[in-house]
Image (tube, rainbow, N blue to C red):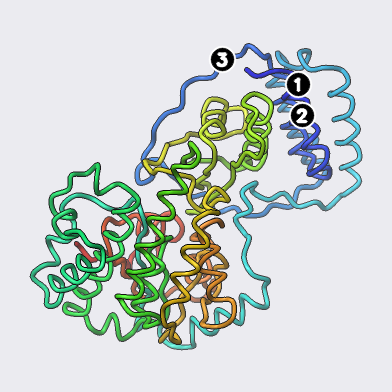
C-alpha cells in the first residue's frame, strides 16, 4: 500500500501527538500492521443529501475496562494482520497503550474536533444575545450559501421582483461583464470558474432577499441573526447593513480573482468526507502529509479540514497528492466514503495565503458599519463585529476552516424543555444549507424556507 518507512513515520507522529488516546493508538497499531501489498477498493461518489447521516454523539466517557473489551474485539477481527507489523513498533505501541491506561477517566472525542466552539461561559453569554427570552417562532434566521451552489438558470425566478434587474445591471457595471446573461445561460464551464461563480452567487443571494422582502417583509424585520457560508458571508454583511452592496461586490471581485490565482499556483482541491463515529480524520490528514513528503518530496504539504458541515461530514482540502492518498486508503482510517468537490483549489487552507493581501487591501478601501443584528463569523463561530479584529477575521476566512457546524450549534441548541425554533430562510441558489440543518436538527428544519431563485 505504501512503504514501511512511511508507516514508521506515521507511528512516530502518533507517538508525539496523541500519547494518551488508547483507542487511537490501537487504530495506529492496526494501520501500521497491515500488509503493504493490500489493495483497497476505489472510492465511491456519494451525495450529501442522500447518503449523509447524523449520529448525535459528540463525547463519550470511556473507562479502561470498556477499552480492553473493544481492543480484544478489534484484535480478533484483525488477527490476519497482527504478525505483519514489526516487533519494535508493536512493542512500543503496547507500552504506550499501557501507559495510557493510567488515565482512568480519559474522554474520547470525534477526531474532527466538532466541538471547537467558544468556552461554555462565552457560549452562554452569546446565546443570550442571539436567543432573547421571547417566542422563537416570532423571530427568524437568514442564511446565504457559498461557492458550489451556483447553477445555470439561477436568477430567472427573481427577475419579476422590483429592483432585481437593476441589481444585476449594476453588478455587471462593476464586474465589467454581463453577469445576468452568465447566470441565465452559462455556459456552465464559465459560471463554475471561481472568478465568476463567487460574484454570481453573491449577487443572486442579495437578489433573493429582495424577493424575501417583497413576499415576506416580516421575515426580514424579525431577523435576529444571520450567517453566510464562505463567500456567502459577504451577502450576510450586506443583509445586516454592515457594508453596501457595491462595496461588498468590489471585495468579492478581488477575492475571487485572488483565490483563482492562488489556485493556479499549486495543484490542489477539496473533498467531502463521510465519516463514522471514531473515524480518525486527523490521522488521515497527517498521514497524507507524511506521504506527500516521503513519496512526492513536497516540502510543506497541506491537508486539513477546510469546513465543518455537520457531524460525521467534513470537507478536507490540500495538495492533490494528499487527497488521492486519503481517497485510496480511506478504509484504513475508518472513512465511509469520499466525494471530490468540483472547485479549482484548496480553499480555506494555507494554500490560499497569497490571496490574503489583495483582499485585505480591498477591505480597507470600503466603509464598514455596525450591523443591525448579529452576523456569525465563519472563522470563530462568534459574532462578527466592527472592531479592530474585523479585517483580520474576514481575511483569515481564506485560510481557516469554515465552522458552519459550530454556527448551527450556537443558533439551534436548545434546553430540553424548550422545543420552539425560529423560522430559517436560505437566500440564494440551491438548498445545501437547508440540507445541513436537516442533518443536524430536523426539528429546527421544520421551520426552514428556501427562497427560490
Q: In this view, does 341 lie to the left or right of 350?
A: left
State which quarter of the image contains the N terminus.
top right
Q: Are marks 1 and 2 in contact (CB under 8 Å)?
A: yes
Furthest-left residue in this view: 160
User: The residue tagged with tag 3: helix, strand or loop?
Assistant: loop
Residue drawn at point x = 53 percent, y = 44 percent: 316
Q: Residues within 10 Å of mark 2 (few under 14, many from 20)?
A: some
Q: Is residue 220 left or right of residue 272?
A: left
State which quarter of the image contains the C terminus.
bottom left
**Frontmost residue, 283 versus 236:** 236
Q: In this view, does 451 lie above or below 245?
A: above
Q: In this view, does 438 lie above or below 81?
A: below
Residue at numbered disc 1: 5
Q: Where is residue 323 in the image (x, y as percent from the top left)?
A: 53, 34
N-terminal label among 3 and 1: 1
Residue drawn at point x = 20 percent, y = 65 percent: 172
Residue drawn at point x = 36 percent, y = 41 percent: 342
How many callouts does the rendering have? 3
Residue at numbered disc 2: 9
The part of the image, by quadrant, that contains residue 168 is: bottom left
Query: Which mark is on residue 39?
Result: 3
Distance, label 3 to label 2, CA atoms, is: 21 Å
Amino acid at each position: 500500500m505504501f512503504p514501511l518507512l512511511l508507516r514508521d513515520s506515521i507511528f512516530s507522529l502518533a507517538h508525539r501527538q496523541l500519547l494518551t488516546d488508547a483507542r487511537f493508538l490501537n487504530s495506529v497499531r492496526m494501520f501500521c500492521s497491515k500488509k503493504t501489498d493490500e489493495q483497497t477498493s476505489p472510492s465511491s461518489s456519494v451525495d450529501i443529501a442522500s447518503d449523509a447521516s447524523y449520529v448525535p454523539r459528540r463525547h463519550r466517557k470511556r473507562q479502561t475496562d470498556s477499552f480492553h473489551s473493544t481492543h480484544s474485539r478489534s484484535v480478533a477481527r484483525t488477527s490476519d494482520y497482527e504478525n505483519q507489523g514489526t516487533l519494535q513498533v508493536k512493542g512500543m505501541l503496547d507500552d504506550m497503550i499501557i501507559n495510557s491506561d493510567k488515565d482512568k477517566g480519559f474522554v474520547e472525542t470525534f477526531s474532527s474536533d466538532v466541538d471547537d466552539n467558544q468556552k461554555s461561559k462565552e457560549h452562554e453569554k452569546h446565546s443570550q444575545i442571539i436567543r432573547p427570552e421571547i417566542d422563537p417562532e416570532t423571530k427568524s434566521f437568514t442564511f446565504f450559501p457559498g461557492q458550489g451552489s451556483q447553477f445555470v438558470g439561477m436568477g430567472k425566478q427573481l427577475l419579476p421582483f422590483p429592483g432585481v434587474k437593476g441589481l444585476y445591471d449594476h453588478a455587471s457595471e462593476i464586474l465589467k461583464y454581463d453577469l445576468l446573461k452568465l447566470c441565465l445561460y452559462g455556459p456552465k464551464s464559465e459560471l463554475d470558474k471561481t472568478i465568476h461563480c463567487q460574484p454570481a452567487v453573491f449577487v443572486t443571494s442579495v437578489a433573493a432577499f429582495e424577493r424575501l422582502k417583497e413576499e415576506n417583509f416580516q421575515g426580514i424585520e424579525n431577523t435576529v441573526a444571520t450567517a453566510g457560508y464562505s463567500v456567502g458571508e459577504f451577502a450576510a454583511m450586506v443583509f445586516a447593513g454592515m457594508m453596501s452592496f457595491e462595496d461588498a461586490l468590489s471585495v468579492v471581485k478581488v477575492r475571487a480573482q485572488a483565490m483563482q490565482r492562488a489556485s493556479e499556483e499549486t495543484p490542489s482541491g477539496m473533498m467531502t468526507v463521510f465519516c463514522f463515529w471514531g473515524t480518525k480524520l486527523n490521522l488521515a490528514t497527517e498521514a497524507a502529509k507524511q506521504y506527500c513528503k516521503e513519496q512526492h518530496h513536497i516540502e510543506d504539504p497541506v491537508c486539513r479540514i477546510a469546513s465543518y458541515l455537520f457531524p460525521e461530514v467534513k470537507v478536507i482540502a490540500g495538495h492533490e497528492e494528499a487527497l488521492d492518498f486519503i481517497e485510496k486508503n480511506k478504509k484504513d482510517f475508518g472513512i465511509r466514503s469520499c466525494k471530490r468537490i468540483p472547485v479549482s483549489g484548496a480553499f480555506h487552507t494555507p494554500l490560499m495565503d497569497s490571496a490574503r493581501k489583495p483582499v485585505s487591501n480591498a477591505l480597507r478601501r470600503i466603509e464598514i458599519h455596525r450591523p443591525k443584528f448579529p452576523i456569525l463569523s465563519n472563522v470563530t463561530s462568534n459574532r462578527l463585529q466592527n472592531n479592530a479584529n474585523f479585517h483580520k477575521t474576514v481575511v483569515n476566512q481564506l485560510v481557516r476552516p469554515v465552522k458552519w457546524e459550530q454556527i448551527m450549534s450556537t443558533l439551534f441548541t436548545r434546553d430540553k424543555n424548550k422545543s420552539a425554533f425560529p423560522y430559517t430562510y436560505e437566500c440564494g441558489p440551491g438548498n445545501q444549507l437547508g440540507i445541513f440543518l436537516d442533518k443536524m436538527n430536523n426539528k429546527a428544519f421544520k421551520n426552514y424556507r428556501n427562497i427560490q431563485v
